[in-house]
Amino acid sequence: MQIEPLFPVALGRVQLSPDPLDTALQLQALHELRGHASSNPDPGCAWTGDLNGVWQLQRQPAFAPLIAGLTGHAEAFLQQLGFDLSRVALHLQRCWPVLSEEGQVVGRHHHPNAHLSAIYYLNGDGSGRSGCLRLWPQRQVNELVPGMAVGHEGPLAASPWSAPWLDVAPQAGLLLLFPSCLDHAVLPNEDPDDLRCSLSIDFALTAPVARDGSSPPEYLAPHPSQWQEL
């Protein structure tokens, strides 16, 4: 019997080759932004800039060129999904760093106020020792009976058709893009000699600016410049 995969979730991967000097300067800047803090605030949780006032890295000179380039890959991701970029406006909502020391994690969560999320790794050797990104499906329909895919010696053997999650190892220069609604987490950093450093980016999609005589937005929220704050 042939089994056909239906409704795949899109995970974009781009392996970039950044200038080592630029990366060194960015890592130094992240250390300075974190200061004397080491967690967020639980000692077991990685330090994340979004909870510490560091959430607009795209406006900082050390990061602006890098993030502008990453945004271009986000547009390419949308095109590959079939979006007509002339009818969509892509907005960078926020960009923040995540610094994970040995034993630290980021708990399972998703980003309900964004549409597309990205992670860019400033370091990592691909082994996963410094803490993999774990992605969960919104619903595991192939397990047929809810809970079968978790394992524990149940009657359903592990296979790609019923994988309960996907782990992606950090690799310096790796960019990942995925729907913001997906639950994800960062596993423990098991490398005592490596501070895991990454950037997280949230994007939102709206309609372009509506010009005089053009059709009003229908499928997307109107462009923010045409909202009225109350």
Image (spheres, helix red, strand yellow):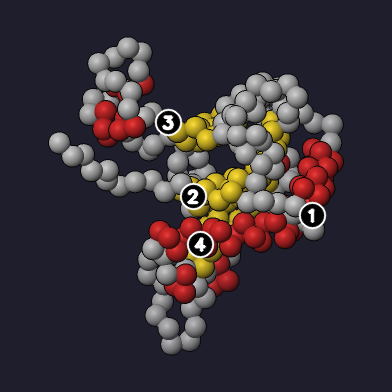
Q: Which residue is mark 1?
A: 62
What is the CA distance from the residue labelled 3 to the residue labelled 2?
16 Å
Amino acid type of the residue tagged 3 in the rendering: Trp
State which tag comes first along the sequence, 3 or 4: 4
Can residue 118 be seen here? The reply is no
Numbered badge on residue 76: 4
Residue lying at 63% horizontally and 51% vertically, measured from the top left: 16
Asked if residue 169 is positioned above or below residue 213 in the image, the reply reads: above
Q: Residue at x 48, y 78 (%)?
A: 210
* Badge 3: residue crowd in 10 Å (few <14, some 14–19, many ≥20): some
Looking at this view, name the residue that lies furthest to the bottom.
213
Do the residues under discs 3 and 4 have CB atoms within 8 angstroms? no
Q: In the rendered view, would you say 144 is above or below 14?
A: above
Give the percent coordinates (x, y) of residue 123.
69, 39
User: Horizontal placement of 176 versus 32: left or right?
Assistant: left
Residue 204 in sight: yes
Report helix, strand or loop for mark 4.
helix
Q: Are marks 1 and 3 in contact (CB under 8 Å)?
A: no
**Left or right of 94 in this view: 84:** left
Residue designated by label 2: 12
Q: Tell us which disc is closer to us: 4 or 1.
A: 4
Which amino acid does the dot numbered 2 rest on? Gly
Q: Which residue is mark 3?
A: 165
The residue depicted at 36 percent of the width and 21 percent of the height is: 150
Residue 10 lies, with reference to residue 3, above or below; the image says below
Please tell me whether mark 1 or mark 2 is closer to you in this view: 2
The disc labelled 4 sits on which kind of residue?
A: Ala
